[in-house]
Image: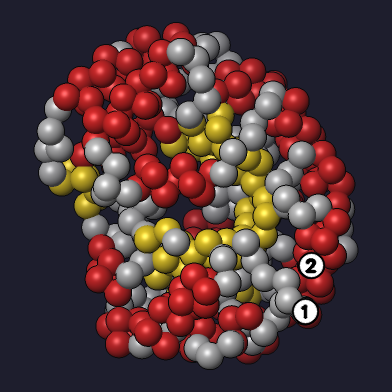
Amino acid sequence: MNIYKILKLAVSSKTPRFVKFAGLFALHVTGRRYIGIFFDPVLACNIRCRMCYFSNEEKRREMNGVITGSRLDAVERVLFPRALKLQIGCGAEPTLYPGLEDIVKRARKRGIPNITLVTNGQLLVNKIDLRRLVESGLNEVILSMHGTTKETYEYLMKGARFDNLLQLTEQLTKLKAEFPNFRIRINFTVNSMNQYDLTDDNFWSIWPGDVRPDVVQLRPVQDMGSCEWDDYNSEPLKSNYHRTIGNVAAYCMAHDVICIAPTVDQLEQVATDQDETTALIEDVTYYYVSPTAAYRDDFDIEAETFVQYHRRHHTARRLFKAIFRPNAGRSRNASKKLNYSIG
């Protein structure tokens, strides 16, 4: 089951609204998988990326905690059977969690078809056995990488070492040869400084041999609040688009690499309002879980089942009505997780 084909269908303007909601309604009422779990088992990070809230000392003090055994049991029991995707890591660094392999094994036991690890990769070089995670059921690593030169990488990702990144790309290359279905994805947050790492062949220079990532996401920097980075002007990205983001997107298209990136016209839209369709789809499919949160504040995941919660909130009725209701236009501001072209 290719999660990127499903994502492309979900975000496509060519897919009629009624088709999207009829599909979601059918999956919901028949007890099938349709949710994505975005899981931070530990609220901490080992580096201080300048574009991230972990670069703010006060914010770091507010964010703390490790998921307990009973809460993890509840997440597995209540959410895993309905999950199409489990993403381990959603802002924090999951390789700091000592039971990472256990989470992967639980997800595999519950039949989740897409199990992903989002990481800066620094601890995968010497402290975490990535091969064991893959053998346990992990089928994708999403590597957060915001530079392809030592100067840019270590400046933007404070505390990370560029030589660790180079070792990791070699390790991933060998792993890919052994497990061909294992996916490598790069998440690159583009700003006025590191955009030049996307020119010419610079973006691909750190990969040994002919191996390339399976998926590349290029995300323009967004104001996350309370972080060191303060340059959110999109004009430099627009003026250099075809040399930078467009250059990498064109390479991906020519070499069968999935690329998730905004078009030049979408650059201004990355942090604007969501339309009602996207907002409702996200409401019913996006489940953030951490030591302190589980989907919604009123969801007591240790005392209530998935079905009980959604009966209480009339989710089936909302989805059924949405099949026949026209899009009401703009409704709320969000980070526009789905506002990208996928090719």
Q: Which residue is mark 2?
A: 173
The image quadrant that residue 298 belongs to is top left
Residue at x 78% of width, y 33% of height:
105
Task: Tell me: 122 left or right of 202.
Answer: right
> Which amino acid, mark 2?
Thr
> Which amino acid, mark 1?
Gly
State which quarter of the image contains the N terminus: top right
- Between 236 and 55, the residue placed more toward the observer is 236
> Can you give x and y, in whole percent of width and height, for residue 217 in the image?
50, 64
- Between 301 and 234, the residue placed more toward the observer is 234
Residue at x 44% of width, y 36% of height:
286
The image quadrant that residue 119 belongs to is bottom right
Colour mode of the rendering: secondary structure
Q: Which residue is mark 1?
A: 209
Q: Is residue 243 visible?
A: yes
> Can you give x and y, in whole percent of width and height, for residue 28 in the image?
42, 19
Residue 26 badge: none
Q: Is residue 227 visible?
A: no
3D distance between C-alphas at marks 1 and 2: 9 Å
> Can you give x and y, in whole percent of width and height, for residue 116 in the image?
64, 46
Task: Tell me: 131 left or right of 339.
Answer: right
Instruction: Point out the tag, 1 or 2, that comes first from the N-terminus.
Output: 2
Residue count near mark 2 (Cα–Cα under 10 Å), binned few <14, some 14–19, many ≥20: many
Circles 1 and 2: CB atoms closer than 8 Å: yes
Q: From the viewer's perspective, is residue 177 above or below residue 205?
A: above
Dot 1 lies on which element?
loop
Callout in the foreground (1, 2): 1
Task: Tell me: 119 left or right of 300.
Answer: right
Residue at x 66% of width, y 41% of height:
115
